[in-house]
Amino acid sequence: MLSRGENELLTQVGPGTPMGELLRRYWYPIAASSELIEKPTKAVRVLGEDLVLYRDKQGRPGLIGPQCAHRRMSMLLGIPEEDGLRCPYHGWLYDHAGKCLEQPYEQAEDPGSTFKDRIRIPAYPVEELGGLLFAYLGPEPRPLVPRWELLVRDGVLRDIGAAIIPCNWLQIMENSLDPVHVEWLHQHFFNYVQERLGRKEIKGNPVRHKKINFREFEYGIVKTRMLEGESEDNEDWQVGHPVLFPNILLSGSTSRPTFQIRVPMDDTQTLHLWYTCYARDPKAPQDVIPFYNVPVPTIDASGEPPWPLLDNNSGEDMIAWITQGGVADRTQEALGLSDKGIILFRRQLKEQLEKVRAGEDPINVFRDPDKNRYIKLRLEDRKLNSGSFRPGQRRQGGATKYSPVLNEEERAGK
């Protein structure tokens, strides 16, 4: 277990907190590029800060404070211009650095006024990669946006799912360092959910863990497992799944890899993104990567669980995270042998906190373009438990249950 102070150290992400300072060394995806097609502005919350994401008339993304410095009207209603976003209340125009460029009435009344030059609102850099919009809220000089393999891979189809999960980012990440939950939450509990829903489809031949292991590598931690009936030659043990520090799990298989990206909005909310590549040969480049929302299961006031949303891995994971509370009370936990990965991740967080305190870059802060062209990652060829349904039944995976790419293929009979 952790002390209350240790739990607060690892879970508080706002400005000025130690973990907030560490996490501000990284770029975060805050939206899919396609979300700004029909609506040029979007309210976002990142690391405890409310901001407005927008795209100007030149197509450039920007991220600025939520209110105009003049009379505090919301910039979510701002008007995109060639060089920034204009407040609709009195026409004050802000550029991508948050600098006020125009104050129409003041400049008409006093053409020599320098008032606008003294006005700024918060603003942060935004970059676009792989159909995602990334924001950086940390100190300069800013690092490079990591060119992880999935973001820059050629010859694939992609889609992006999202959910706002009402809990702290750390309990979501700790789930990624917990292989054994697959055996129970995604098999036995799944079968119980099917029973509650009156369905006959169940997962047979359940996997059982024989042993688990974790090893640190250049980009974070690799988790491996050995199941009953397997040897150390099996790819579950030899390859495993990487967890990229501080907030990404690579899951799935080589033919359908998925980034699960956890973006801390604040201490009790997390933007969870599912970024999936499908091994398809697209006839034409995917100009727009489809975006979809993943429903979030919550227990209602009557105490009734949302059973229909719990028949897939993502729904099962989310209900486990959410029912731990907004911030899990780790002073009350009782860790066992299966929790060695969680202990390792917490140690890694503390080590990287110390590096930031010492004025050093933590891991996965990239500054050398030659090392950031294409960051290759290794993953198993098959997905654990992918064939665990009884014959004749199609396995429902995680968030890809709601995937527009897969649903389109199903409609087309592929």
Image: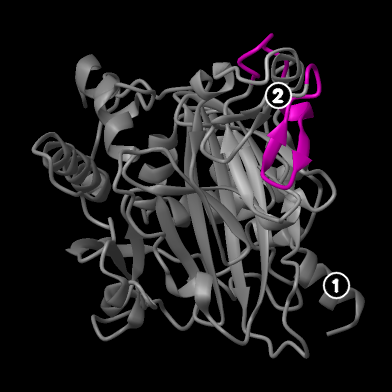
Segment colored magenta: 67-90
Quadrant showing the N terminus:
top left
- Mark 1 or mark 2: name the one nearer the start of the chain: 2
Is residue 131 positioned above or below 255 on the image? above
Q: Tell me, yes or no, whether the highlighted magenta stretch contains residue 101.
A: no
Residue 396: quarter of image? bottom right
Residue indicated by mark 1: 408
Question: Around disc 1, counting alpha carbons within 10 Å, would you say few (fewer than 14), some (14 to 19), or many (20 or more)?
Answer: few
Question: Around disc 2, counting alpha carbons within 10 Å, would you say few (fewer than 14), some (14 to 19), or many (20 or more)?
Answer: many
Which amino acid type corresponds to the residue marked 2 in the rendered image?
A: Trp
Residue indicated by mark 2: 92
Which amino acid type corresponds to the residue marked 1 in the rendered image?
A: Glu
Is residue 328 positioned above or below 344 on the image? above
Name the magenta segment's main secondary structure: loop
Residue drawn at the location 29% of the way across and 48% of the way down = 141
Quadrant showing the C terminus:
bottom right
- Residue 215, given in percent of the width and then of the height, sits at 19, 63
Colour scheme of the picture: one colour
